[in-house]
Amino acid sequence: MNYGLLMLLVNTETIPGYTVVEAKGLVSGNTIRAKHLGRDIGAGLKNLVGGELTGYTELLNESRNEATQRMINTAMSMQANAIVNVRFTTSAIAGGAAELYAYGTAVVVQPNQ
Amino acid sequence: MSEVLIGLLPILFMAAVYVTLSVIGVVSEQRHEKELDRREAAAGHFPLFDTKTLPPGVSGTAGQLISGNVVMGTGYLKQFLAGFRQLVGGEVKGYQRVLSRARREAQLRMVEAAQQQGATAIINVRFETSDVGGMKPFAEVMCYGTMVR
């Protein structure tokens, strides 16, 4: 998975090769996705055998990208050019629906001379 | 006598379906493990660290987030056996094997994506496991970190 090139995203507190010059504050993005019935039944059948449930892998991947994109949009509106200390959480809030949440600290960074 | 046999047919049919699916599950698990061994060998020894900074001796600049994920189902056979295991307690080896495979797969996807983008190492590697199946035993494993070039 590749996260946009306009915004530098890292899950560390500092970025190798860059210096944080200004902290803008916490930014986050979330999405709750339900699987559609056809996929759910398909995955139910696949689960009798076991192994990877490709439909779900893709669904969660896309949803996490969506949550990340929302976080990036918030950071862009704050004129930040990087997000540090990015964290992800996933929770099953109901049978068949999952929440994907991404959060981090929006900062302004400058490349080291 | 023949009436009893006809009555048993649906049960026998279902049993045959479950046995077939279980056999396919066991075979596909072994194939997946072999495939993981092969891909891990192809990826070579890629430096991964769960520290927040690069350890001495490893250089790199310009980080970017990288991740890999997989949703893995357990299969009916393992659920059935786990049900018995839960009566007596102890390690549920079937599930342990499924989660190991899922973690290896997620880590490998992350490493392969990082290698494609020319990374030299990944720092601050984290694993996240979540139960996304509700009542069904599925788990998602996500592996993420900051790659450096």
Image (tube, grey):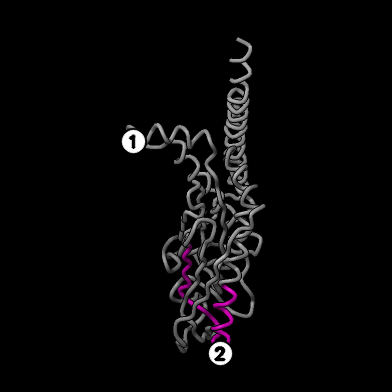
Q: Residue furthest front?
A: B3
As drawn, the label of residue A6 is none
Q: Secondary structure at mark 2?
A: loop
Q: How many marks?
A: 2
Q: Is residue B16 left or right of residue B56?
A: right
Q: Secondary structure at mark 1?
A: loop
Query: What kind of residue is marked 2?
Result: Gln
A86 or B1, nearer to the observer:
B1
Residue A50 % position (x, y)? 57, 40
Label 2 neighbour load within 10 Å: few <14, some 14-19, many 20+: few
Residue at 59% x, 66% y is A63
Residue B103 % position (x, y)? 50, 50
Q: Which residue is mark 2?
A: A79
In the image, is residue A88 part of the stretch drawn in magenta?
yes
- Quadrant location of the C terminus of chain A in the rendered image: bottom right
The chain that hosts pointer 1 is: B
The chain that hosts pointer 2 is: A
Quadrant of res B13:
top right
Q: Is residue B96 left or right of residue B110?
A: left
- Per the rendered image, the range of residues in magenta is A68-90
Q: Residue furthest top?
A: B1
Q: Which residue is mark 1?
A: B90
Residue B36 % position (x, y)? 59, 43
In the image, is residue A79 part of the stretch drawn in magenta?
yes
Contact? badges 2 and 1 (CB < 8 Å): no
Question: Would you place residue B6 above or below residue B135 in this image?
Answer: above
- Quadrant location of the N terminus of chain A in the rendered image: bottom right
Label 1 neighbour load within 10 Å: few <14, some 14-19, many 20+: few
Residue A94 % position (x, y)? 48, 59
Query: Mark 2 and mark 1, same subunit?
Result: no
A52 or B149, nearer to the observer:
A52
